[in-house]
Amino acid sequence: MLNFEGRVAIVTGGAQGIGRATVMALAERGASIGLTNIRCAKLDSTIKELEDMGRKVLKFCVDVTDVEAVQEMVEQTVATWGKIDILVNNAGITKDNLVMRMKTDEWEAVLKTNLDGAFYCIRAVLPTMVRQRYGRIINIASVVAQAGNVGQANYIASKAGIIGLTKAVAAEVARRNITVNAIAPGFINTPMTEGLPPEVKEKMLSMIPMGRMGTDSEVAQGVLFLASPETSYITGHVLNINGGMYMA
Ligand code: NDP
């Protein structure tokens, strides 16, 4: 089993879904966790679970689009634990609409959270990772950034941006022993997807060779892999976790 004893991780959007599964998977293997979410109260049950497991945890009520709050979160983590080994940029939203009907604020909100938020977090942790000559950054993209989809131009642009950002930062910091990778999940059973109309779910399922949705913990396993010290020569990579939905 991968071991994260003594490692410090920040996970954004960690209150539910893929973020929460990632937090629990890292904590079960020994990591100390800085946990963020936009809606603060939603973090409480996860924090109690982590404390019951005997894990160290910092709670951050942080909107990733708030540059100063992101900076403070990173400073407080370093002040408390002296380092940051792992950043998982997971926080994400959708505001689906056809391009012709898409409102400017639907476009901007999705780009701001999914892409700008990841950039703010990466920029904030890099000085610490460069100083310590170690880091693992994992950005959660999406299969639709590779395959396209109707009604999600804002989301797809943000996730394609995440893949580009991943490769650009990976090249910049490769010599500092910092790896930067993305995960492109397919159709995953989380609160984000549970409200989709049945006919949309059916259509998505028909596109998945494995014939089922993925689980949040199946994505978390990919995060663990890329976050581990052992995967030290993988950088700028996009890991598909999609049941065969898109094979690149
Ligand atoms: P969920 O909607 O279930 O969880 C997203 C989490 O992010 C929530 O806890 C949410 O908080 C938090 N969040 C949203 N905006 C912000 C913000 N500005 N600052 C801090 N936290 C924020 O989504 P999933 O678990 O399904 O998705 C996680 C990631 O995986 C996302 O980036 C998503 O785009 C990506 N993804 C998901 C897929 C899927 O099929 N589920 C497929 C491909 C990619 P709150 O609830 O309080 O708003």
Image (cartoon, helix red, strand yellow):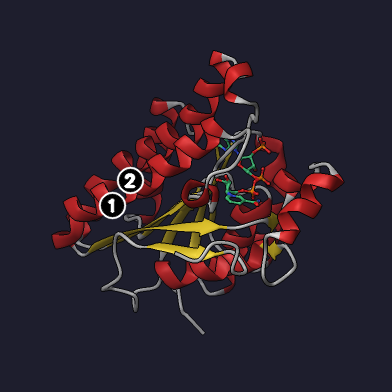
Q: Nearer the viewer, residue 157 or 113?
A: 157
Cα distance between the residues tagged 1 and 2: 5 Å
Crowd rating for badge 1 (residues with CA inside 10 Å; few <14, some 14–19, many 20+): some
Q: Describe residue 139's horizontal placement relative to residue 212 as left or right.
A: left
Disc on res. 228? none
Residue drawn 52% across and 85% down? 1
Disc on res. 164? 2
Q: Nearer the viewer, residue 162 or 12?
A: 162
Q: Are marks 1 and 2 in contact (CB under 8 Å)?
A: yes
Which residue sits furthest top? 104
Task: Give the vertical position of 170 relative to 38 (above or below).
Answer: below
Task: Give the vertical position of 105 relative to 239 (above or below).
Answer: above
The three-letter code of the residue at mark 1 reads Lys
Residue drawn 18% across and 60% down? 174
Which residue sits furthest bottom? 1
Please state the horizontal and vertical placement of residue 64, each as a whole percent of the image: 48, 34
Residue drawn 20% across and 65% down? 177
Which residue sits furthest right? 198
Q: Describe residue 68's horizontal placement relative to residue 142 as left or right.
A: left
Q: Is mark 1 within 8 Å of ligand 1?
A: no
User: What element does badge 2 sit on?
Assistant: helix
* Residue corresponding to mark 1: 167
Q: Describe residue 119's horizontal placement relative to residue 107 as left or right.
A: left
Residue drawn 47% across and 27% down? 112
Can residue 207 be seen at all in this image of the molecule? Answer: yes
Please state the horizontal and vertical placement of residue 203, each as a whole percent of the image: 76, 52
The three-letter code of the residue at mark 2 reads Gly
Q: What is the quadrant of residue 116 in the picture? A: top left
